[in-house]
Amino acid sequence: MRNLLCFISLLLCTTYLSRAQEYTFSQGRTSQTVEFELINNLIVFPLTVNGTELTFILDTGVGSPVIFNMTSSDSLQFRNIEVVKLRGLGEGEPVDAIRSKGNTLLFGDIIGKHQDLFIIYNEKLDLSGKLGVSVNGIIGYDILKDFVVSINYLSRKITFTNPADYSYKRCKSCETFDLHFYKKKPFINAEIENLDNSIVPVQLLIDSGGTDSLWLFEDDEKNVSIPENSFEDFIGEGISGGIFGMRSKLNAFRLKSFLIPKPNVAYLDSVSSAYAKGLSTRNGSLGGNILKRFKVILDYPNKKVTLKKNRNFSEPFSYNMSGIELIHAGTTLVKELNSTRFSLENESSVSNSSTITLNYMYSFNLKPLYKIAYVRKDSPSDKCGLMVGDILVKVNGKYAYNYQLKDIVQKFYGSEEKWVRLTIERDGRELDYSFKLKNLLEMF
């Protein structure tokens, strides 16, 4: 079997071209609406692959479906396989993967036969650990190209409709944009207003698989430059490792009549930008933290996208001020009190005395275990002494296993000057730390 090298932008954007692989409705339907979970600005929903139900992220920045880290307990059969090598964002080497042809994917009453997909076995690429919920893969262009897809971030519902049966409603508050495709990826034209008030036209990848607001590639010739008021940070995880860049703010971001003031922006480092850029006119990515402020209608067959702002539109932009990145690191066995019962026994009728016996009923349960995977240099967590590898025991006095990962992380996005108290385990010892959140972006 041949080894192939594929350069991938964002998390994974496959460039393989293959024969048409269509998705269609079964049972004569023309439209279908399904619910999804919104986790860290990502759209997460169930998808059946070769008869096995998995969980996927809808990622407009990817072509063919990609499955990560299947285990021996996952009874999933793959067909017509070949070994490939994939190179993506991050500081690392290409990884081994498997390309499989002839698969069947089922999404409600939508079915895709003879589908290509990729399987990556790389324990460092742990989406489930980073999101705190089970996620098996990502899917994008292949399932979007055959439908008009309406994404309602408020109701957490996504509707797929046959293009011939879709009717656009009159909407004075909507804006429609032409889409430009490059290697199965959709691009949109927009404008940024830099901190020096200069306005720059940009071409951005629409990336529903990105949690941030905007990623930009530094390009001094196009006046896309990293401002002095910025700081280095971990901004994501790629197939080849961690992705680092500089965080800052823009004065504004414009999508025709939609003006979004003071959005957060991340400027990718030169190494990541080189792999991610691909298209020479591309300036960056438009991510989930802006997309969620709209109702989004993706019309791939007619190469256009329509946006209508929702009540999230004016939501302030925030970021993880703690400097900590947490991961779900497995489970821990916890002894928990179920109930307490007591019994009363008379010892002697003469002394009129009684004995009270207390019976404690315990159970042992597996609970989530969270670990610090990254600490930003000179951040509040770094300055107070927290370290990579520390196991989280308590958050503000409450046991960490009582939280979902997203609920703990949300505490790091709180108000500036808010205190956070953490108890961690390190080398078998429990240690207490506290720090005050510091919003570096508010200084800009």
Image (cartoon, rainbow, N blue to C red):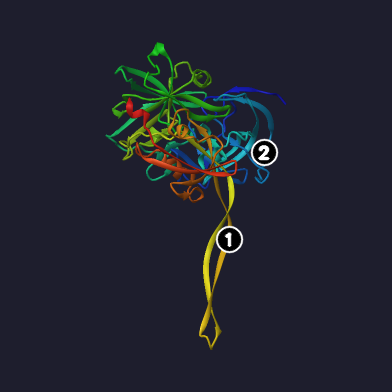
Q: Which one is closest to the eye, mark 1 or mark 2? A: 1
Looking at the rendered image, the quarter that the N terminus falls into is top right
Q: Is 154 on the left-hand or right-hand side of 356?
A: left
Residue at the spot x=52%, y=48% of the render?
27
Mark 2 element type: loop
Disc 1 to disc 2, C-alpha distance: 40 Å
What residue is rendered at 58% in x and 34% in y? 125
Q: Quadrant of residue 312?
A: top left
Q: Can you tell which quarter of the image residue 443 is in?
A: top left
Residue sticking out furthest to the front = 351
Using the image, tell me which numbered label, if any, was put on residue 171.
Answer: none
Ranked by sequence position, the earlier of labels 1 and 2 is: 2
The C terminus lies in which quarter of the figure?
top left
In the rendered structure, which amino acid carries the disc numbered 2? Answer: Phe
Q: Are marks 1 and 2 in contact (CB under 8 Å)?
A: no
Res 201 visible: yes
Q: Please identify the residue farthest to the top as the structure is shown.
A: 221
Q: In x, y percent, where is residue 316?
A: 33, 35
Disc 1 designates what residue? 363
Classify 10 Å Cα crowding around label 1: few (below 14), some (14-19), many (20 and above): few
Relative to 234, is 200 above or below? above
For disc 2, the marked residue is 78
Identified by mark 1, the residue type is Ser
- Residue 233 in percent (x, y) is at 46, 27
Q: Nearer the viewer, residue 254 or 441?
A: 441
